[in-house]
Image (cartoon, helix red, strand yellow):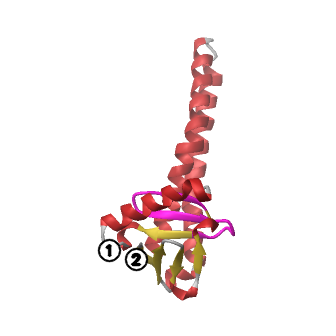
Amino acid sequence: MKIYNRTLYDKALIIQYNKYYFTNFLITRYSFMGAVVLGFSIYLFILNQTNYAITLIGILVAYFILIYLMQIYSTKRNLKNNPIVENPFVQEYLFTEDEILMSYGEKAEYSSIQKMKVTKQFILLHSKDRKTYIVSMSGFKSKDDCDTLIQFMRNLKGKTKL
């Protein structure tokens, strides 16, 4: 197997990456907290403790606004301080049966990949040495290559604990 990918690391990729993490945070953590707060609020409404219920809902809304503003601020700060914005570069990946070869001479064994996350825009690979590889879905030669790679990586899950 030899699957080639060409990923452009630029401002748009940074923004997509930050949006992904913000959305993931909302889905995993904020939604759970929101459900708990809404449950308590309904209970307080039933007990005729309207002021406390409205206060809880207000805190939940204020927290959402705060994390949204923090996301905007941190994205702007990342774009300002990130050298990729001024000097975008192309990272080329060659996925073979044994390892991942990258342009600039880097390579990674599949056993060093701890976690894989597939989104609509990219595949995120997290290594044991805390490196994150962003592989753009649009960088594959064909959709079949992308599907083959994802299936190959999932098949490795039992062997390498992906």
Q: Quadrant of the C terminus?
A: bottom right
Residue 131 appears at what percent x and percent y?
Answer: 63, 70
Say which amino acid is labelled 2. Answer: Tyr
Say which amino acid is labelled 1. Answer: Lys
Q: Mark on residue 141?
A: 1
Residue 99 appears at what percent x and percent y?
Answer: 54, 74
Q: Secondary structure at mark 2?
A: strand
**Quarter occupied by residue 138:** bottom left
Q: Which stretch appears magenta?
A: 114-132
Q: What residue is shown at x 52% (from left), y 81% (from top)?
A: 102
Label 1 crowd bin: few (<14), some (14–19), many (20+), radius 10 Å: few
Q: Mark on residue 53?
A: none
Residue 29 appears at what percent x and percent y?
Answer: 60, 43
- State whether residue 162 appears in this view: no
**Along the horizontal axis of the image, is 31 left or right of 12?**
right
**Quarter occupied by residue 52:** top right
Q: Is residue 146 magenta?
A: no
Q: In the rendered image of this protein, does residue 144 appear above or below residue 96?
A: above
Residues at discs 1 and 2 in contact (Cβ within 8 Å): yes
Label 1 and label 2: CA atoms lie apart by: 7 Å
Q: Is residue 131 magenta?
A: yes
The chief SS type of the magenta part is: strand
Q: Which is more toward the observer, 7 or 28?
A: 7
Q: Secondary structure at mark 1?
A: loop
Q: What residue is shown at x 57% (from left), y 27% (from top)?
A: 38
Q: What residue is shown at x 58% (from left), y 12% (from top)?
A: 46
In the picture of the structure, the residue carrying the numbered disc 2 is 4
- State whether residue 115 appears in this view: yes
Q: In the rendered image of this protein, does residue 19 appear above or below residue 13?
A: above
